Image (cartoon, rainbow, N blue to C red):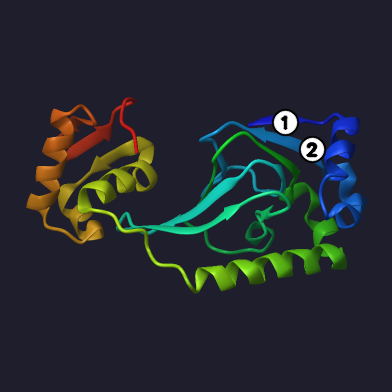
Amino acid sequence: MKRFYDKALIETHLKQTKFESVMSGLRKYLFVAQYEKGEFVTMPLQKEHLFQIIIQGSVSIYFIRDDGSVYSLSNSRKDDLLGEMEIFPHQPSNVYAESKNDVICLALSIETSKDALLGNCQFLQMICESLTKKMESITTIDAAPASLKQRVLTYMRYKCCKGELKGLQQTAFHLNCSTRQLQRILNQYESDGTVVKTGKGAYKLTSSSSF
């Protein structure tokens, strides 16, 4: 992500969103965030929580369950909001937002502007409307169909620290499969160079692995 604090640039993008009247009173907190294709716009356990309005580009939002199943929540585009839930205290989620192309957002740090956000009735109405639409969407979704082999990759990428799986029995429990099935899949991935064995019952994604 690249950040830009140029006031003229911020004003230009502020005029491009339908939320200009709401966000104008918060302009001193705003900056422009730019993302490249494939970059995470939001992800669990990130160090800084941002509230963002998409100005240009599109973002894929999805939820990863502990068994590696992927739920596609939405594809967000211009004027969609990101980071509403981060304004309120809650347990870390498993929701990821990934840029599908080059994305530009108006953004602000929730930590440094939280009092101003919570004291702005128009802003709170805006995020309530956004969250309501997302809840309506969530009630109709199903997990994207995926084979066990694909779920193993998803699990390693999103649930394992630095892409390294440790402990076959525990992992098999999370993936709802047998240890033998998991070992067979890991052997296949090791053969084609997708993973490398790092120790007993431990495998790590290689830099060449793709999804």
According to the picture, the residue beneath numbered tag 2 turns out to be 31
Would you say 175 lies left or right of 33 here? left
Please indicate, yes or no, whether residue 140 appears anywhere in the rendered image.
Answer: yes
Q: Is residue 200 visible?
A: no
Which residue is at a point 82% across and 62% down the rendered structure image? 123
Tag 2, which secondary structure?
strand
Which image quarter holds the N terminus?
A: top right
Question: Residue 154 location, x and y as percent?
Answer: 33, 46
Estimate how packed mark 1 is, as few (under 14), some (14 to 19) or many (20 or more) residues with alpha carbons within 10 Å. Answer: some
Q: Is there CB contact under 8 Å for labels 2 and 1? A: yes
Please state which of residues 2 and 170 is positioned toward the viewer in this rendering: 2
Q: Residues within 10 Å of mark 2 (few under 14, many from 20)?
A: many
Q: Looking at the image, which residue is at 85% across and 57% down?
A: 116
Residue closest to the eye, 103 or 165: 103
Q: Residue at x 11, y 57 (%)?
A: 178
The CA span between labels 2 and 1 is 7 Å
Instruction: From the top left corner, tell me how far across and down residue 148 is, in percent.
Output: 21, 53
Give the residue type that dot 1 points to: Arg
- 49 to 33, vertically: above or below: below
Residue in view at x 24 percent, y 31 percent:
194
Q: What residue does disc 1 label?
A: 3
